[in-house]
Image (spheres, grey):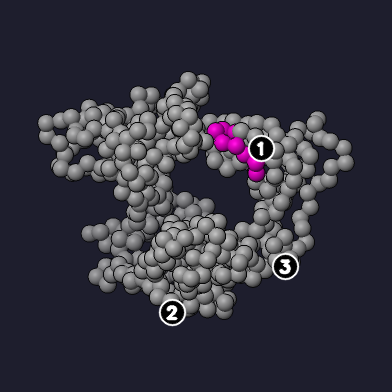
Amino acid sequence: RGDGATGEDITQNVRTIATIPLKLHCDKPPTLLEVRGEVVMPLKGFEAFNKKAAAEGQKVFVNPRNAAAGSLRQLDSRITAQRPLEFFCYALGKLEGCALPKTHYEQLHQLSSWGLRINPLIKHVHGIDQCLQYFQNMNTIRSKLDYDIDGVVYKVNSISYQEDLGFVSRSPRWAIAHKFPAVEEQTIVEGVDFQVGRTGVLTPVARLKPVFVGGVTVSNATLHNIEEAQRKDVRVGDTVMVRRAGDVIPEVVAVILANRPAHTHPIKLPKHCPVCKSEIIKPEGEVAARCTGGLYCPAQVKESIKHFASRKAMDIEGLGDKLAEQLVDERILKDIAGIYTLKRDTLVDLERMGEKSADNLLEAINHSKNTTLQRFLFALGIREVGEATARALAQHFGDLETLEQANEETLQEVPDIGPIVAANIAAFFRQKHNRELIEKCRLSGVNWPKVERPSSENLPLPGKTFVLTGTLTSLTRDEAKAQLEALGATVAGSVSKNTDFLVAGEKAGSKLAKAEQLGVAIIDEEQLLMLLKKYKT
């Protein structure tokens, strides 16, 4: 159970699920089979389980999703065995020592013949109209199913097409989710607060009279930003429709104006941060308003620490949201570097923190020191730098020192990094206090192995930087990028003085104009194809 790279070993718990065979039902099984799927708790089983738990004075779960996830994470597999869990497989991960059919639909049925359960409602359809008809049919019968679903997934059937389309980060280009309309409920806005995020963005949040929506009790709902709140004209005292966007994040859909009480007032953006009292600014052309307090704002410090310690960042188990807030509120932590100077005596004295918990946290903190450059960059919380961008930066620069010295033009040579992201990265490393925090972390023992950058010395286009613009007719931009990179070239997202070639397809725009201005060599699609053909042969 994890993100495809790191996770938890839940094998013993999974072995207790009756719908997962302990042996494949075939005479000549493959030498290696990886199957991906989902564990669910049927609604009838969920209701019976909660009823029994309540009668015995034990914890009851809010919804089947939480119950299934909690059951899989049990340390004692005997407890998992008592939970009403079922499994559906939905994809093949890896296969060795055996051949499978060349379509996704047939592969699933092959897995089914080996004893792996697939959903009986999957269907092979042709064209958009049949996809939409299937969607409508599922929406009609969803209330009759014994498990919760929030939509359907359309997948390209041909495995060779799937391989050609590939992935964006971890998301496949050959599959897309189509969500059902969210369940909506009415409730009353009792107040509106402004939350301050990790990057200083102020988010208005409606405090609601609690209402049960889509399987959970909702008492807070995001209003996204001040412009959205004012566009919807949400006011304290209003009756509003609330839903969970994507069946996850509660949001206010609309105001029922007919129920509006007298003497209400529109929401106004505060002039000062509700946490640190710093000035609030809203740059022209942006929807987000921001606190200018930076790392001096406790709210931003809290969020930066939460992000730094999160699983996909430094993965410090035990340093959750509540503890991070407590450490900042009690002025024990002032920044992310302070995590590595925490003392056992200080932690033991905290409320709800015993000796064992303190020892476990310190062990997790110490373990987090051995990380990767990609994880550390993501953990820093640089604006617009997610996991994929952090990975691209680590692979391109190889070490932190080179990245810290990079200017905006150099940063734009990294694949998929444009002017806005480059400006954010350069601005982050220009700040003295950010560099000091990084140095404190490294002096405390945070380290990572040097990133081995692929050698392009023996390839025909080492060190050459290409930029692609406009529409290519013979191959996709991704295909062109892959072929150029295979020859040792770098494909950047924007033109700079360091660009060697601009490949201009049909309807090329501003990049072409900038290349002409900088005197960059410009080639068309035909010349690109000739170049690729020359070096392939």
Taking the spot 23% from the left edge, 32% from the top edge, the residue there is 21
**SS at badge 3:** loop
Q: Is residue 220 magenta?
A: yes
Tally of marks: 3
**SS at badge 1:** strand
Question: Marks 2 and 1: in contact by CB < 8 Å?
Answer: no
Among the two numbered marks 1 and 3 on one chain, the one whose residue lies closer to the N terminus: 1
Taking the spot 34% from the left edge, 46% from the top edge, the residue there is 75
The residue beneath circle 3 is 278
Is 243 in front, or is 276? Answer: 276
Taking the spot 47% from the left edge, 60% from the top edge, the residue there is 354
Magenta part, dominant SS: strand
The residue beneath circle 2 is 443
The residue beneath circle 1 is 210
Is 131 in front, or is 433? Answer: 433
Q: Is residue 333 magenta?
A: no
In this picture, residue 161 sits left or right of residue 152: left
Alpha-carbon distance for marks 2 and 3? 31 Å
Q: Amino acid at mark 2?
A: Leu
Is 272 in front, or is 276? Answer: 276
Q: Determine whether 179 is above or below 504 in the image.
A: above
Image coordinates of residue 332 in percent, x first then y, are 56, 70
Alpha-carbon distance for marks 1 and 2? 48 Å
Question: Marks 3 and 2: in contact by CB < 8 Å?
Answer: no
